[in-house]
Image (cartoon, helix red, strand yellow):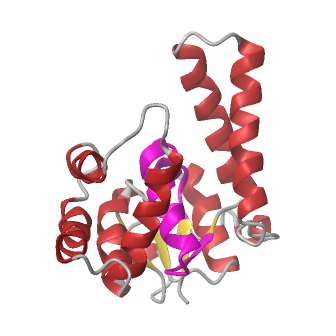
Amino acid sequence: MFAALLDTCTLWPSVRRDLLLSLSVEDLYRPLWSSAILAELESSERAKQERRGRDGKTAHQMARHLVETMTGAFDDACVRDWERLEGTFGLPDHNDEHVLAAAVTGNADVIVTDNLKDFPRAYVPRHIEIQTPAAFAAYTVSVHPQRAARAVTKMLARYTDPPVTRSELLDLIDARYGMAEAADALREVFDTGDEYG
């Protein structure tokens, strides 16, 4: 099973995060992150909740709950001892060094990020690919479309307030996150009734 280091920008939008982690639950890949990525995620989530009108304490609790839920569900995802490599790659933006350090330390096959320009090919070890979340989702769905469809079905079962239809979710990941290829592949599985094949 291949391993993917999920950058903070990949994990922060909630529906996209849920989709990608749901695919992992179906054993389509192994997710990786670091303490630094989780700290960035927690900070971003706290700020989002405050912008939505939550008081500081509630926003902090919600952000903390998100990180604790992720680390509890994926207890082997957090890469340890990446710090020794931070600053050794010479990336254009030093603030991205921790991402590459965690990817190398965790033996990741791919870094999933919206910020492709921050990881120039010449600075990244050859065995690590750099992919956008949309490209990664398309590839991961293609590995086993039926398992991916099962992941979406289980994901939808959690969406009860308000409920979301399969069509609404696939339209959302297409329109909001540019995941047209993954959405189309999933639609094809559902249209043929082959999600349990």
Q: Visible in this render: residue 90?
A: no
Relative horizontal placement of residue 192, taking residue 196 as reference (left or right):
left
Relative horizontal placement of residue 181, taking residue 119 as reference (left or right):
left
Residue 143 rendering spot, x and y as whole percentages: 36, 86
Query: Which residue lies at the image location 42% right of the left edge and 79% below the top edge?
Result: 147
Q: Nearer the viewer, residue 191 or 93?
A: 191
Residue 169 rendering spot, x and y as whole percentages: 31, 49
Decide whether the magenta segment is chiefly helix, strand or loop. helix
Instruction: Look at the picture and state if 72 lies above or below 102.
Output: above
Residue 73 rendering spot, x and y as whole percentages: 72, 61
Query: Which residue lies at the image location 33% right of the left edge and 80% below the top edge?
Result: 145
Image quadrant in which the C terminus is located:
bottom left
Image quadrant in which the N terminus is located:
bottom right
Instruction: Look at the picture and state if 125 lies above or below 59.
Output: below
Q: Nearer the viewer, residue 62 or 101?
A: 62
| Furthest residue in direction right, as rendered | 81
Instruction: Look at the picture and state if 29 lies above or below 96.
Output: below
Relative horizontal placement of residue 67, taking residue 27 as reference (left or right):
right
Relative horizontal placement of residue 79, taking residue 116 as reference (left or right):
right
The stretch in magenta equals 6-31
Residue 40 falls within the magenta-colored stretch: no
Residue 12 falls within the magenta-colored stretch: yes
Query: Which residue lies at the image location 53% right of the left edge and 57% below the top edge?
Result: 7
Residue 153 quadrant = bottom left
Residue 130 rendering spot, x and y as whole percentages: 40, 72
Q: Visible in this render: residue 102?
A: yes
Number of numbered discs present? 0
